[in-house]
Structures are given as structure tokens and as C-alpha cells.
């Protein structure tokens, strides 16, 4: 069944008010609305409508949409516009395969770097997550979780790995939004365990903890996703 065409979402922050390019800001806004489900699979994103609603020209919108297509969030249809893509079960399985390799590598490299400098920023992310959980702030918890995993990538000190993971991180978050809300306190315990392993400066331990955590949640998550996503 065709989804209705959505002219454009309301954006919280004024566009063009930061030092990032306008296409980047537009891309970020649309990506977040796809991830949180505001823009559902099958929704049409037309250049003209988006530009009018955002009070920008069509050029930065046109530049933003192919980026989202390259990241897997949007599918460009000739003479019709861009459509929000549909995640499939096969893609979910592929994402878990990637996580088992690249997120484990990031944890290993982060622990190696922690030998030289304590992961202060990682601990700060953990504390933000704890404060948000105690306050019952679900969005704050999600933001802190994303920041925590982003900080591990930064700590890896590997620009190539960071570049490879950039589009993947968004798709993993999109996947998690389809799953039932996770217990924030359970998440904090996992993050604390991983943080401690990285802070120990033991790469093998950090990699083992990261791998075990991903594998533990893989089958239970895929069992839920089998009821929600098409096969391919």
C-alpha cells in the first residue's frame, strides 16, 4: 500500500544557524526523523515540498537526499522523488554481522589507546546515561547511548574505521527504534562493563566483552524483528 507523501517535517533547530553546511543540516534532520519513525517507510520526500516547508532552495535539498540514499535511508525514484526505504530482515542480519566485527574492533582499539590516556569522555557519557535513566528521560538515555558508542569510535583513533562506521551507526539506531524499549538500567550495566574493560587498557578483554554483548542480544532482537520486517 502506498504511503502518503509528506511535504516536510517540522524541525526543532533553525537551519543555517550553525557552521555546518545547509545540506548537512537538512540531511541530519531528515535522517533523525526516519530513525525515530516520524517519517515511515514508503513516505515520499519531494524536493519542492521539502524546500518550501524549510524555506530553503531546492539545491541543498537535492544535495542532501543522495547522501541519505547512500546511507540506505532513502531510495531515489526517477521522475517521482525520494522514498523512505524499508528495512528488511536480511539487512538487520547484515548489520549484526558488521557489529560483531567492526564494533568489536573499535572496542579493541579504544582499549589500546586507554593505555596512554584515561577514557574520561567515555565515563562522562556513562554518567549522562545514568542521570537520564534516573530521571526517566527516555530520549536522554537514547542520546547518551548513541554518544557512548560514538565515543568508543573516537577513542579508537582510527579515521578509516570512523568513516566506515558513520553511515552504519545511523542504520543500527534505526533498527533499535523498531525494537521494544530496552531497560535503561540493564543498558547501563552493559555500558559500565564495556567501559571498565576499555579503561583497563586490555584490548583482548575489551574485544571479548563487546563481542559477547552483541551476540547475547542478537537472537532475541532478530526474533522480534522477524515479526516486523519483510524477509528482503
Image: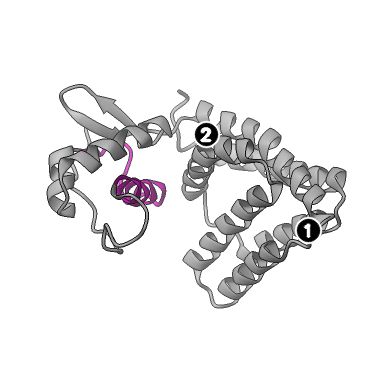
Colour basis: one colour
Say what secondary structure mark 1 lies in: helix
Q: Nearer the viewer, residue 163 or 2?
A: 163
Vertical order, 10 against 124 (above or below) = above
Could you say where residue 21 lies in the image, as x and y percent from the top left? Answer: 33, 49
Name, please, the residue furthest toward the front.
19
Residue located 52% across and 60% down the image: 142
The span from disc 2 to disc 1 (Cα, nearest Å) is 29 Å
Q: Which span of residues is magenta-colored?
A: 23-45
Quadrant housing residue 14: bottom left
Crowd tier of the residue under label 2, counting other residues whose Cα lies within 10 Å: few below 14, some 14–19, many 20 or above: some
Q: Nearer the viewer, residue 136 or 33?
A: 33
Circle nearer the viewer, 2 or 1:
1
Q: To which residue does mark 2 refer?
A: 226
Magenta region includes residue 26: yes
Quadrant placement of the N terminus: top left
For residue 220, which numbered disc appears in the image? none
Residue located 63% across and 55% down the image: 151
Q: Is residue 115 left or right of residue 210?
A: right
Q: Is residue 142 left or right of residue 74?
A: right
Magenta region includes residue 59: no
Could you say where residue 176 lies in the image, as x and y percent from the top left? Answer: 52, 47
Vertical order, 168 against 124 (above or below) = above
Quadrant placement of the C terminus: top left
Vertical order, 90 against 137 (above or below) = above
Crowd tier of the residue under label 1, counting other residues whose Cα lies within 10 Å: few below 14, some 14–19, many 20 or above: some
Say what secondary structure mark 2 lies in: loop
Could you say where residue 47 lies in the image, as x and y percent from the top left? Answer: 18, 38
Question: In this orientation, does residue 219 appear?
Answer: no
Q: To which residue does mark 1 refer?
A: 193
Residue located 24% across and 24% down the image: 77
Q: Is residue 210 left or right of residue 45?
A: right
Amino acid at each position: 500500500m502506498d504511503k502518503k507523501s509528506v511535504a516536510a517535517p517540522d524541525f526543532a533547530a533553525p537551519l543555517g544557524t550553525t557552521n555546518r553546511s545547509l545540506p548537512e543540516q537538512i540531511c541530519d534532520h531528515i535522517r533523525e526523523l526516519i530513525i525515530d519513525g516520524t517519517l515511515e517507510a514508503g513516505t515520499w520526500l519531494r524536493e519542492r515540498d521539502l524546500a518550501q516547508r524549510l524555506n530553503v532552495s531546492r539545491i541543498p535539498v537535492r544535495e542532501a537526499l543522495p547522501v541519505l540514499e547512500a546511507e540506505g535511508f532513502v531510495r531515489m525514484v526517477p521522475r517521482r522523488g525520494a522514498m523512505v526505504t524499508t528495512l528488511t530482515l536480511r539487512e538487520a542480519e547484515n548489520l549484526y554481522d558488521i557489529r560483531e566485527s567492526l564494533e568489536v574492533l573499535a572496542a579493541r582499539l579504544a582499549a589500546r589507546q586507554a593505555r596512554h590516556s584515561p577514557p574520561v569522555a567515555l565515563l562522562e557519557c556513562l554518567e549522562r546515561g545514568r542521570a537520564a535513566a534516573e530521571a526517566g528521560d527516555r530520549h536522554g538515555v537514547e542520546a547518551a547511548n548513541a554518544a557512548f558508542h560514538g565515543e568508543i569510535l573516537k577513542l579508537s583513533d582510527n579515521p578509516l574505521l570512523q568513516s566506515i562506521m558513520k553511515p552504519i551507526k545511523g542504520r543500527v539506531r534505526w533498527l533499535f527504534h523498531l525494537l521494544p524499549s530496552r531497560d535503561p538500567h540493564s543498558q547501563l550495566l552493559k555500558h559500565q562493563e564495556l567501559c571498565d574493560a576499555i579503561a583497563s587498557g586490555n584490548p583482548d578483554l575489551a574485544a571479548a566483552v563487546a563481542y559477547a554483548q552483541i551476540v547475547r542480544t542478537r537472537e532475541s532482537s532478530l526474533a522480534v524483528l522477524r515479526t516486523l520486517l519483510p524477509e528482503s
